[in-house]
Image (cartoon, helix red, strand yellow):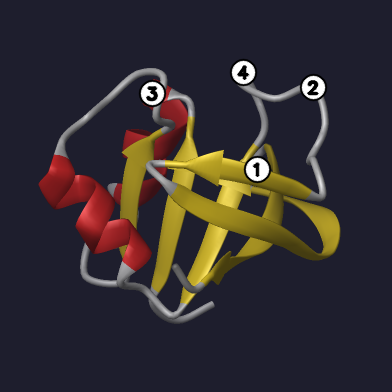
């Protein structure tokens, strides 16, 4: 997957980034955290993924996180015991 950013609920975000912190930058969603360093790091990655487990009931077509609009790309998939979907950041 290369360099990626992940947005998820608290434990899924940090637990995922521990696998390879050089490639995976993660933050809990914006209702939990406001650490701008983590957020900037996630949004600077070429690919952004959301993990819905423990947070979302489904992957919406569009959502806002940390004042960024994200649009769903492709289909969800199951990896690392989590449901994941890629999102593209709409330029501000």
Specify few, some or many for label 3: CA neighbours under 10 Å numbering under 14, 14-19, or 20 or more: some
Element marked by disc 2: loop
Element marked by disc 4: loop
The spot of residue 75 in percent (x, y) is: 87, 61
Instruction: Tell me the quarter of the picture where residue 44 sits.
Output: bottom left
The spot of residue 58 in percent (x, y) is: 82, 31
For marks 2 and 3 on the same chain, the one whose residue lies earlier in the sequence? 3
Disc 1 + disc 2, Cβ < 8 Å: no
Q: Label 1: which residue?
A: 63
In the shown orientation, is residue 21 left or right of residue 68? left
Q: Label 3: which residue?
A: 10
Q: Label 2: which residue?
A: 57
Disc 1 + disc 3, Cβ < 8 Å: no
The spot of residue 38 in percent (x, y) is: 20, 48
Near-viewer residue (8 or 39): 39
For marks 1 and 4 on the same chain, the one whose residue lies earlier in the sequence? 4
Residue at (56, 54) in percent of width and height: 69
Specify few, some or many for label 1: CA neighbours under 10 Å numbering under 14, 14-19, or 20 or more: some
Q: Of the residues tagged 1 and 4, which is closer to the observer?
A: 1
Specify few, some or many for label 2: CA neighbours under 10 Å numbering under 14, 14-19, or 20 or more: few
Q: Label 4: which residue?
A: 54
Q: Of the residues tagged 2 and 3, which is closer to the observer?
A: 2
Q: Of the residues tagged 4 and 2, which is closer to the observer?
A: 2
Q: Please determine whether, in this image, residue 2 is positioned above or below residue 87.
A: below
């Amino acid at each position: 997957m290369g360099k990626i950013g992940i947005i998820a609920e608290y434990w899924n975000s940090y637990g995922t980034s521990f696998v390879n912190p050089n490639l995976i930058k993660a933050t809990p969603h914006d209702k939990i955290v406001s650490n701008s360093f983590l957020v900037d790091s996630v949004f600077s990655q070429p690919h952004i993924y959301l993990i819905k487990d423990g947070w979302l009931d489904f992957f919406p077509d569009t959502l806002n996180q940390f004042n960024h609009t994200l649009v769903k790309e492709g289909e969800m998939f199951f990896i690392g015991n989590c449901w994941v979907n890629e999102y593209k950041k709409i330029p501000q």
